[in-house]
Image: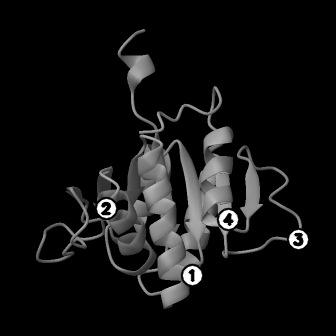
């Protein structure tokens, strides 16, 4: 097996910096499930859905990466569960990094920033799973990515891994 074959899967979790307690717990469960499968959790590094997902992954012993909008810790303090903080200084333009760095994207609730990440992921051919997020009557017909809707954190993570190029590569730690 080559080193390339052993690269960890990166699952991006996208969502709002503010969310209600029920969505927070759903995102936390998603993060935990991602870590339990041996994948790296990537998010925007701030609060709300991003904090919850990072917390779940961190509590399960996973690796968390935050792609932050500001250029420094003072500009964009990461949530306490981010282990690797990448300060971009790019504001919303960091959404491109979030999407490009992920092997699959799970969008949980979210506003227009999350919507832009969904659209970018589909445009560049990344699989996207929606959990209590934006709904579309007709998924972007010209998009290269695959769009699925999940009703539970378990389904969202299972579908994201199933849609990975080459199939499910989870390590089930």
User: Does dot 4 land on a helix, a strand or a loop?
Assistant: strand
Q: Is residue 63 above or below residue 8?
A: below
* Camera-side mark, 4 or 2: 2
Q: Which residue is mark 2?
A: 59
User: Does dot 3 land on a helix, a strand or a loop?
Assistant: loop
Find residue 23 and report its horizontal and vertical position in percent: 54, 81
Label 1 crowd (10 A; few <14 / some 14-19 / many >=20)? some
Q: Quadrant of residue 70?
A: bottom left
Measure the C-alpha gap from mark 4 to mark 2: 23 Å
Quadrant into which the N terminus falls: top left
Of the residues under marks 4 and 1, which one precedes in the sequence?
1
Label 2 crowd (10 A; few <14 / some 14-19 / many >=20)? some
Q: Quadrant of residue 44?
A: bottom left
Of the residues under marks 4 and 2, which one precedes in the sequence?
2
Of the residues under marks 4 and 3, which one precedes in the sequence?
4
Q: Which residue is mark 3?
A: 137
In the displayed structure image, the side of residue 26 where residue 98 appears, left or right: left
Disc ID at residue 130: 4
Of the residues under marks 2 and 3, which one precedes in the sequence?
2
User: What residue is shown at x 47% (from left), y 33% (from top)?
Assistant: 171
Contact between labelled residues 1 and 4, with CB atoms less than 8 Å apart: no
Of the residues under marks 1 and 2, which one precedes in the sequence?
2
């Amino acid at each position: 097996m080559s080193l390339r074959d052993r690269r960890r899967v990166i699952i991006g979790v996208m969502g709002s910096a503010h969310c209600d307690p029920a969505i927070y717990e759903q995102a936390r469960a998603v993060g935990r499930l991602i870590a339990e499968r041996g994948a790296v959790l990537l998010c925007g590094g701030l609060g709300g859905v991003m904090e919850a997902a990072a917390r779940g992954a961190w509590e399960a012993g996973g690796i968390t990466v935050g792609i932050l909008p500001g250029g420094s810790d003072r500009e964009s303090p990461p949530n306490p569960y981010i282990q690797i903080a990448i300060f971009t200084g790019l504001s919303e333009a960091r959404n491109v990094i979030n999407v490009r760095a992920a092997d699959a994207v799970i969008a949980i609730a979210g506003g227009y920033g999350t919507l832009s990440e969904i659209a970018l992921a589909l445009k560049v051919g990344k699989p996207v799973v929606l959990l209590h997020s934006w709904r579309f009557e007709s998924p972007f017909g010209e998009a290269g990515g695959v769009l699925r809707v999940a009703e539970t954190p378990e389904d969202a993570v299972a579908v994201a891994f199933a849609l990975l190029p080459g199939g499910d590569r989870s390590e089930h730690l």
